[in-house]
Amino acid sequence: MRSAFVRLFVGPLVTVSLYAHAAWAQTYVLKAPTADVEAIVRTEGPLALEVRLAGRTVLSASDLGLEVAGRLDPDRMPGVTKTTRRAVNDTILPVAPLKRSRVPDRFNELRLELGPSLAFTVRAYDDGVAYRFETAYRDSLTITNERATFRFAPSDSVYAQLAACRQEKELDCFHTSYEENYRYVPVRALPADSLAFLPVLIKTAAGFALLTESDLWDYPGLWLQGRRGEPTLASRFAAYPLAEGVFGGEFRQRMVTKRADYIARTAGTRTFPWRVLMLATDAVKIIENDLVYRLARPQVLEDASWIRPGKSTEEWITSRLLYGVDFASGLNTPTYRYIIDFAADFGLPYVMFDAGWSDPEDPFKRNPDIDLPALIAYAREKGMGIILWNLAMGLDRQLDAALDQYQRWGVKGIMVDFMDRDDQKMVRFYERIARETARRRMFVNFHGAFKPTGMERAYPNLLTREAVLGHEFNMWSERVTPDHALTVPFVRMPAGPLDWEGGSMHNATQKTFRAVFERPMNQGTRTQQLAQYVVYESPLQYLGASASDYRAEPAFTRILAGIPTTWDETRALDGRVGDYLVLARRSGRDWYVAAMTDWTPRQLEVTLDFLPRGAYDATIVADGANADKYAADHVIRTTRVNSGEKLPVRLAPGGGFVARLRPR
């Protein structure tokens, strides 16, 4: 199939020529197709955009414009010379669907031409608003800045992640692994000396607004900075790297030690990233939003039929510890052979070889204790594929040679780690990885990565990425609390797939948790770990506990291994940011209902009115009677339910619930 895009209907195209001196042409109103969402563009001075939800202003964006050396100055924007409006009603068919297998793409669009070489486009959807710039110059451009000031009401609050600046004096704060806890503060209280990376979620009087970006190519990522005492977030960008140094210990990386006085040098004729505002009157509905994907560049791969989502083992988090075996586990051939056997027994399509199979900086210097070609062949005999971890700096030095070798071995996918930047040069690196792996029919998982911006639509072999403070932090910190785990679906997840690497089988209560690097546990119940595989969206999911632990609990493991990684339909049923969540997803004819809570125990009821009429066999995994004291306690039971009835859900502190509903 040449494209994963099906056109159903495109409305009439209307073009009207206007002149900047016409007073009535200084304000333009764009309404969503059916919802009470409005975008109001004003051009009588600095370019400005107001977004309204249910008649109330959610955001006022002012001082919008590109600063282009020798070409454009936002303080003297060209006047409007032409406007174009159109209505679109399409459907996108994702290769690896996260929320739904048919993505409705319905919007109204306004395009303002500002002189002969600049355009400003706004789209209004029923669940959000987006804008971007477009240039039409024959030669290349030097972008010195892109200005935007987003103003909210004085009472509005924000969920934001602030970058923790590196300690090296040569490095600025645009270096981060994008793994932070969320701060929930009034927008006006956001520290003015800190940088926030996207997405951010704003609680407003009208509802909730999630601010992020889409269609990021050959350009730096957007950051935000507060202004002391003001409910304002202003745009910031990492300037282009002029010089780099190598930093770090075991896993070294290139960091920027000198930057240019511009953020990008790029083609003169191009579109720039979409600035995206997702909207919902209730926070839980933000979870259903896939606006970043809809706004992204359509698929560029001519053939994506070879891409296979699924689950994989992950051995690094448990230090490759096995027990009940007759060999010393670790970085050696017997350990990986055991893991391959485990994956085959439980129907996992992939096995991960994390850091340690080679010299991090040279993939051609293999660990002599691991017979990698033989293990890849052994996995292939059992119908499974191998994923290889790669240090970004080491891979970049010899990308083509390394990927060619992986292709000869039959490797199915790679993880690329420790980028920790999103300047223009690094964004180009992501695209290069996506393109070159796709040429060799390999998929990719980015770690140490910036948030998704829809690149996975153009390159569906980009199955997932990190950009989240996930399960691995349990090895050395107490930061992955249930509160954090229940903020991630509302803030990070709407941007795109996230690699959490969960599935812990060492489960702790709030009282008993402690960080143990070699044998990490998690905060919350085992059933919450299971629920995360339904809640967190990722076409590639990892089982992050020891294969020996999973073998000790075969009934639980078979349920975990059987949860799909792609979905045909998603319903966010109930929830509050950081507190609890109830979600339903459909794969084929089966429905999965999952619930999670923070440290507060809860009694909930789920009305099964989303099910087609009929009876269903339900396999339920719930917190056990003593899960409040022994977090691994869980029960597995089967019962029969009918569409429309109420399903009781009891959640222990830090608890979870999963039900698979299969039509009888």
Image: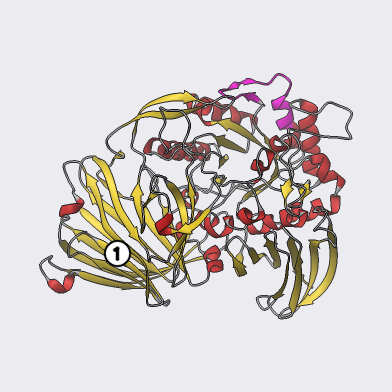
Query: Was residue 359 drawn as part of the magenta stretch in this picture?
Result: yes
Name the residue nearer the viewer: 602 or 67.
602
Give the percent coordinates (x, y) of residue 475: 69, 39
Outermost residue toward the front? 229
Name the residue nearer the viewer: 312 or 631.
631
* Side of 79 relative to 523 (left or right): left
The image's colouring method is: secondary structure
Within 10 Å of disc 1 (Cα), the crowding (few <14, some 14-19, many 20+) is many
Query: Was residue 479 drawn as part of the magenta stretch in this picture?
Result: no
Q: Amino acid at mark 1?
A: Leu
Q: Is residue 237 above or below residue 572?
A: above
Give the percent coordinates (x, y) of residue 468: 56, 47
Q: SS at mark 1?
A: strand
Give the percent coordinates (x, y) of residue 214: 42, 53
The reply to whether residue 429 is visible in this rendering is: yes
Q: Is residue 377 above or below residue 630?
A: above
Residue at 71% x, 40% y: name it.
Answer: 515
Quarter of the image with the C terminus is bottom right
Give the percent coordinates (x, y) of residue 617: 80, 70
* Side of 149 relative to 448 (left or right): left
